Every structure is written in structure tokens, then in C-alpha cells.
Amino acid sequence: MSQPNSIIKDIKNKKIAPIYFLSGDEPFFIDQVSKVIENEVLTEDEKGFNQSVLYGNDVEMKDIIGMAKQFPMGAERQVLIVKEAQHLSRTIDQLESYAENPQPSTVLVFNYKGKTLDKRKKLYKNLQKNSVLLESKKIYENQIPDWIETTGKELDLALETKSKYMMSEFLGADLGRIYNELQKLKIVAEDGKITPEIVEKNIGISKDYNNFELRNAIETRNAPKAFRIANYFGKNPKDNPLVVTLSILYQTFSNIIVYHSLTDKSQGNVARELGVNPYFVKDAATAAQNYPLKKATRIISLLREADVKSKGVGATGNVSDGDLLNELLFKVFHL
């Protein structure tokens, strides 16, 4: 099974396969490879007669195979890209015989999002022989900051540690959106250095009022700072949804509980066990010192209560998300 970067490198080096079957749960990598094929394999002059984009909900497999068997016009290759190919899942096995002996002058691309092929079937085995297979997997949330940093480096950007965590917490796991924002930052950052101030100015994230800073305020028991951030969140609920904040705090206190259970509290082991960057091990140690095991366990219960109330269960009157967050912080700092 190939990786997106190696596939893209081969395409740019003109090492082209007859079939690209791009499947899996992370659409960004599928779109990324497909776009490179669309842009790089043929020249602009060749594309007019030799490049076609089809959609899985508008075409049948037999028609795709028929087009794939045709020869290019005035070019070495033709490119046939089938987007939303997951809609063809019931008939995809019809590709089996073509995959065994594909037309060498055709580049056939399937964007098979949200699904994967049955590896026990002959179709998969035939594709393994003659094609490039990609199974695009979702990145775990705790891996997003490092992905931002690595992708930034590929764009010649140097992100400060706080910058990548700000972006991760504000943009979530939408890799396509993150990539677009990194490209935007590349335009505005002349020297390629991405500071929190640049992120704040160009992505709309406050460098002082975000979940990264709220978590730090709670870990260090800086109540005034935490309540300032909570009040800001209350005034800007669309940009700071409570469900995201609660999820981050739940992970924070879950990590504190794990930290207390560790006998080996070396930086490397803590980073490995908590699944965090070594940069944050010091913060974890501070948080654990401020929140003994029993207190951290009680706060997990408070977070669950707040989550239930935010869904309208057990809340009295018209309580806003800002009110719920302030109530939660009051309980956390008075345990």
C-alpha cells in the first residue's frame, strides 16, 4: 500500500501507473493525489481531448471500462478520473478483468472515498499487480499539530510550537482547511516564520483567547485568566463551541489521571504514554501537581455533567454555553 507523498513524487517524476485506486476515510489525501494527476500527467494542450472527469453517481462501470480501453488522441496517454467513485461500490467488481490487463496508454483514477476494497477478492489482488493503491486513513487528533508542522515545512514554513497548536485547536481535523490556511500563511509570511501573532491576524484565532490558553490557565490554576477566556468564549460562541472546549478539557484531565498512574515519569515515557509532544510534558507535570488523582477524577465527572447540560438535559432555565463554562470553571477551582 503506497503513501500519498511517494505517489505524488513518482507522478512528478513521470513514473505513471495505469490505475490509481484511492480509497479510505481521509478525503484530503485522496483529493491531493487526484489533483496532482489531473494537473501533472498531461500538458494543457493534451487535456482538451484526452482528460475526462466522471462522477460515480452519474456513470456505470461498464461505460468507465469502455472509455478506459480507448486510445488517446495525439498524446501518449489519456487520463480518466472518476470522482465520488464510492457510489459504484455495488458494481466495482466489474473492474476485475480490466485491472488484470489495463490499457497502458490510459491513466484511470478512482476516488473511492469513505470505503475500502475487500482485500480477499480478486479485484484487490489484480490491482496490487498493476496499479497504485492508496488507503487513506484519518489522522488522530493528537497527531494533527505535528502534521501541521510537517506540512508547513513542505511549504517552507517554520511554525512556532504555539502556532501549530492554535491552528489545530481552532481548525480541528479538517486537513483540507488546514492546508488551505497554511497556503494563505505562506503568502503573508515573507520570511516563512509563523508566529502566534501571524496566525491570529490571518486565520481569526485570538492568540490570548483560545482553548490552548484556557487549558494552560486551568493546568496552572490561573483562575482570573481562565475566567477572562471563558467570558470571551461566551461573547463569541460560534468561534468557540463549548463541545470542542469540553472535549479538550476532558482529554487534559484524562491525561492527568494517566500521569498519576505512571511509575516512569521521564519525559520520553510520559510523552509516549500520553500521546503528546515532549514539549508538553512539563505542562502535564504541573497539572498533575495542581490536581491530585481524586480531584482530577471528580473533574472528569463535572465535565460529563456540563456536556449533558449543554445538550439540554438537567439544565434549569435558558442557560447559555458561556454560563455553563463559567459554572464549570467555578467548580473546578473550588474543589
Image: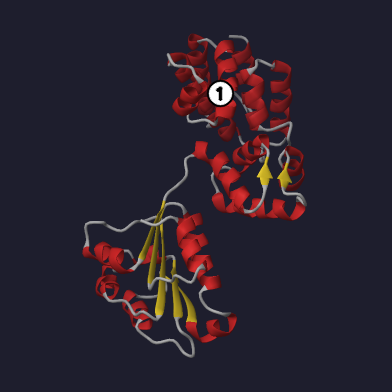
Position of 300 relative to 103 (above/below): above
Under circle 1, the secondary element is helix
Residue corresponding to mark 1: 281
Q: Nearer the viewer, residue 59 or 272?
A: 272
For residue 241, what is the image quadrant? Answer: top right
Task: Give the percent coordinates (x, y) of residue 180.
Answer: 63, 54
Q: Is residue 148 above or below residue 15?
A: above
The three-letter amino acid code for the residue at tag 1 is Val
Horizontal relation, residue 87 to residue 169: left or right: left
43 sits to left or right of 62: right
Across and down, in percent, residue 260 comes to: 47, 14
Q: Is residue 97 above or below residue 176?
A: below
Q: Quadrant of residue 71?
A: bottom left
Q: Is residue 1 left or right of residue 210?
A: left
Residue under the point 55% across and 28% down: 278
Please tell me which residue is depicted at 53% across the width and 17% down the height of the picture: 299
For the C terminus, give its image quadrant: top right
Percent position (x, y) of residue 39?
A: 56, 71
Image quadrant in which the N terminus is located:
bottom left
Q: Residue 19: give x, y in percent of width and height.
A: 37, 70
| Residue 90 visible from this viewpoint | no
Who is closer to the viewer here, 177 or 142?
142
